[in-house]
Image (spheres, grey):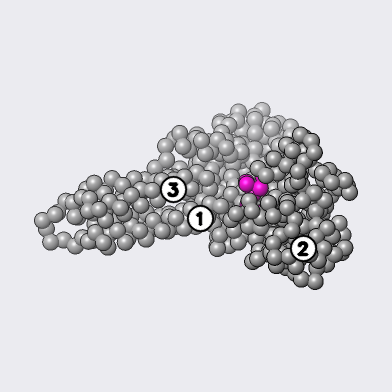
C-alpha cells in the first residue's frame, strides 16, 4: 500500500488546519517534515503531540505546529498514521500537504482513508457509510443517529441473521449430500418456520428505513388549509424570522415555500402551501395544484383552521364545516395529521377538540403571538417520530437506501424460499434461494462488494476522510 496524505479540515481559513497521512511510510515522511523544538525529543512517542516546526521539501520552516505519530493497527485506517496540526490558513495547509507529497506521500482520493479502514477490517461497509452520514448530519438527532450506526449495531445484526442462514445451509447440505444416511436434518415444516423467522427480522429492519430517511433528509411537513388560516404566520413563527408574506388579503401565498427547520434536534423540511379554494386566476390555480402535490408527498400534515371564521359552529358540528379542511382530511389518508385551531385569541371554542376531529391530535394556537407554539413543536415532533417507527430514532438499526435495497432483495429470496419449502421442492433447488439471500445480506456489510460498488460509495466522501 502507498502512503497517502490529504487535508483533513474543511476548506478556507481557520484556527487550525490538519494534514493527515496513512501508510507504511507515514512515520518516515513525518520525520522529514518535522523539526522538534524540544531538546529532549529523541523519537516520536506514539499517540503524543510533539511541538516543533514543519519544513518544506527544501528544509525551510513553514509553520509552528504540533505533530503526532500513531502506529497501526489500532488506528482509524488500521495502518501507521500521522497528523500535522498547523495554523489554518489556506496557503499554509496546502503548503504542508505539498511538502508531504514531495517527500513520498501520494494524494489521497475521496474516501480513501475510510476505504482503507474498511479493507483493513477496522469497520464494515455499513459503518463506513455512517462516517459520511455523520459528517453530513443536518441536526442533533441526525448526529445521534449517525453515531449509533458508526458503533456497528446494524452490521452486527446482519451478521447474526447471516449466521442463522449459514446454519440452515449446513443442514440443507446434510439433507442433499447424505439422503440415505441417518443424520439429523430439519423437517420441511421446521425449516420453513426458521426461514420465516429470519424473514420477519429482515422485514423489521426494513421498517427502519423511514427513520433513516427522516434523520438524513428531514421530514417533509406540509402546512395546509384554507386561505387566511394562518399557515404563513405559523411558518414565520417556527423559523423565527419573516420568510412568508402575511397580509389580510386572501390568497397572498400563491406558490409553496420550503424551508429547513430544526425542531428540537429533528430536521424538518417545512412547506407553506397556497390556501385551498376555488381560484379566480390561473396563477393561483397552479399554486393550489402544487399544494395538493405536496400533500401527497408529506411525511406529516399540519391542518390549520381559521378559528375566528369557524366560530363555535366549527367545534360543535358533526362534520367539518370548512371545505378546504375537509379536502385535506380526505386526501391525507394514512399520513399523520395534526389539527391546529388557530386564532384562539379571537375565538376559543367551548367544545374542543371539535367533534369531527375524531382521534386525530389537536391543539389551540395563536400563530401571530406565538401562544401555544412550544406545544405545537412538541406535538409535531412526537407525530413525526411516532410515524418513523416504534424504536427510538437513534437505535442504529435503520438502513440507508443502498442497504434497504439489499435487504429487500434478501427478503424476496427468503419469502420465495419459504414458499418453495412448503411446496415440497427438493432441498438442492431451495439452496439457490438460500445462497442468494446470504449474498444480499453480505452486500449490507460489504463482505462481497465489488470494486465498482465500493467506488460508487467512497467517491461520495470528502478527500480527507
Q: Position of residue 382 (x, y in %)?
A: 66, 62
Q: Quadrant of the C terminus?
A: top right
Q: Is residue 122 above or below residue 460?
A: below
Q: Nearer the viewer, mark 2 or mark 1?
A: 2
Decide which of tag 2 and tag 1 comes sooner along the chain.
1
> Considering the numbered disc 2 on the image, is that residue within a helix, a strand or a loop?
helix
| Along the line of sight, the residue nearer the viewer: 414 or 252 | 252
Q: Is residue 89 visible?
A: no
Name of the residue lying farthest toward the bottom = 350
Label 2 crowd bin: few (<14), some (14–19), many (20+), radius 10 Å: many
Q: Earlier in the sequence, mark 1 or mark 3?
A: 1
What residue sits 62% from the left and 46% below the top? Answer: 297
Magenta range is 294-301
Q: Is residue 300 magenta?
A: yes
What separation in Å lies between label 1 and label 3 (alpha carbons)? 11 Å
Q: CA distance from mark 2 to mark 3?
A: 46 Å
Question: Going by the image, does 202 lie left or right of 209?
Answer: left
Query: Residue 64: which disc?
Result: none
Q: Which mark is residue 408?
A: 3
- Residue of label 1: 207
| Residue in the foreground of this view, choosing between 365 and 135 | 365
**Which residue shows up at 74% across the image and 32% down it?**
91
As drawn, the label of residue 314 is 2
In the rendering, at what x and y percent does residue 219 appear? 65, 51
- In what element is the residue under mark 3? helix
Front residue of 270 and 286? 286
Is 333 positioned to the left or the right of 2 in the image?
right
Q: Horizontally, is 423 left or right of 62 in the view?
A: left
Vertical comparison of 216 with 103: above or below: below
Picture coordinates of residue 116, whole percent (x, y): 50, 41
Q: Tell which tag, 2 or 3, sits nearer the viewer.
A: 2
Amino acid at each position: 500500500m502507498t502512503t497517502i496524505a490529504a487535508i483533513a479540515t474543511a476548506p478556507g481559513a481557520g484556527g487550525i488546519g490538519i494534514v493527515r497521512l496513512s501508510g507504511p511510510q507515514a512515520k518516515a515522511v513525518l520525520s522529514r517534515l518535522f523539526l522538534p523544538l524540544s531538546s529532549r525529543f529523541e523519537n516520536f512517542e506514539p499517540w503524543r503531540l510533539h511541538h516543533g516546526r514543519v519544513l518544506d521539501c527544501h528544509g525551510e520552516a513553514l509553520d509552528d505546529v504540533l505533530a503526532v505519530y500513531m502506529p497501526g493497527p489500532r488506528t482509524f485506517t488500521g495502518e501507521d498514521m500521522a497528523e500535522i496540526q498547523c495554523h489554518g490558513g489556506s496557503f499554509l495547509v496546502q503548503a504542508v500537504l505539498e511538502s508531504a507529497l514531495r517527500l513520498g506521500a501520494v494524494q489521497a482520493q475521496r474516501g480513501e482513508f475510510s476505504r482503507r479502514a474498511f479493507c483493513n477490517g477496522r469497520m464494515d461497509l455499513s459503518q463506513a457509510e455512517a462516517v459520511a452520514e455523520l459528517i453530513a448530519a443536518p441536526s442533533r438527532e441526525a448526529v445521534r443517529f449517525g453515531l449509533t450506526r458508526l458503533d456497528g449495531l446494524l452490521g452486527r445484526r446482519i451478521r447474526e441473521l447471516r449466521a442463522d442462514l449459514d446454519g440452515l445451509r449446513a443442514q440443507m447440505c446434510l439433507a442433499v449430500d447424505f439422503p440415505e444416511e441417518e443424520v439429523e436434518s430439519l423437517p420441511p415444516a421446521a425449516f420453513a418456520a426458521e426461514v420465516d423467522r429470519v424473514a420477519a427480522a429482515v422485514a423489521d429492519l426494513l421498517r427502519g428505513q423511514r427513520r433513516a430517511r427522516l434523520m438524513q433528509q428531514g421530514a417533509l411537513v406540509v402546512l395546509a388549509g384554507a386561505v387566511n388560516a394562518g399557515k404563513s404566520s405559523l411558518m414565520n413563527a417556527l423559523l423565527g424570522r419573516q420568510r412568508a408574506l402575511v397580509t389580510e388579503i386572501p390568497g397572498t401565498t400563491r406558490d409553496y415555500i420550503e424551508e429547513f427547520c430544526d425542531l428540537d434536534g429533528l430536521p424538518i423540511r417545512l412547506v407553506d402551501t397556497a390556501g385551498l379554494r376555488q381560484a379566480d386566476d390561473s396563477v393561483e390555480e397552479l399554486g393550489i395544484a402544487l399544494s395538493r402535490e405536496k400533500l401527497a408527498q408529506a411525511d406529516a400534515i399540519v391542518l390549520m383552521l381559521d378559528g375566528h371564521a369557524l366560530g363555535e359552529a366549527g367545534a360543535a358540528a358533526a362534520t367539518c364545516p370548512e371545505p378546504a379542511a375537509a379536502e385535506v382530511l380526505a386526501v391525507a389518508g394514512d399520513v399523520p395529521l395534526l389539527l391546529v385551531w388557530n386564532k384562539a385569541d379571537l375565538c376559543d371554542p367551548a367544545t374542543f377538540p371539535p367533534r369531527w376531529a375524531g382521534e386525530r391530535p389537536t391543539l389551540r394556537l395563536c400563530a401571530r403571538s406565538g401562544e401555544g407554539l412550544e406545544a405545537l413543536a412538541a406535538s409535531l415532533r412526537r407525530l413525526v417520530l411516532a410515524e418513523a417507527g416504534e424504536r427510538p430514532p437513534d437505535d442504529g438499526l435503520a438502513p440507508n437506501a443502498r442497504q434497504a435495497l439489499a435487504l429487500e432483495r434478501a427478503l424476496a429470496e427468503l419469502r420465495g424460499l419459504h414458499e418453495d419449502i412448503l411446496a415440497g421442492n427438493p432441498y438442492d433447488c431451495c439452496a439457490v434461494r438460500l445462497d442468494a439471500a446470504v449474498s444480499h445480506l453480505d452486500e449490507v456489510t460489504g463482505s462481497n462488494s465489488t470494486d465498482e460498488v465500493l467506488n460508487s460509495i467512497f467517491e461520495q466522501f470528502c478527500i480527507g476522510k
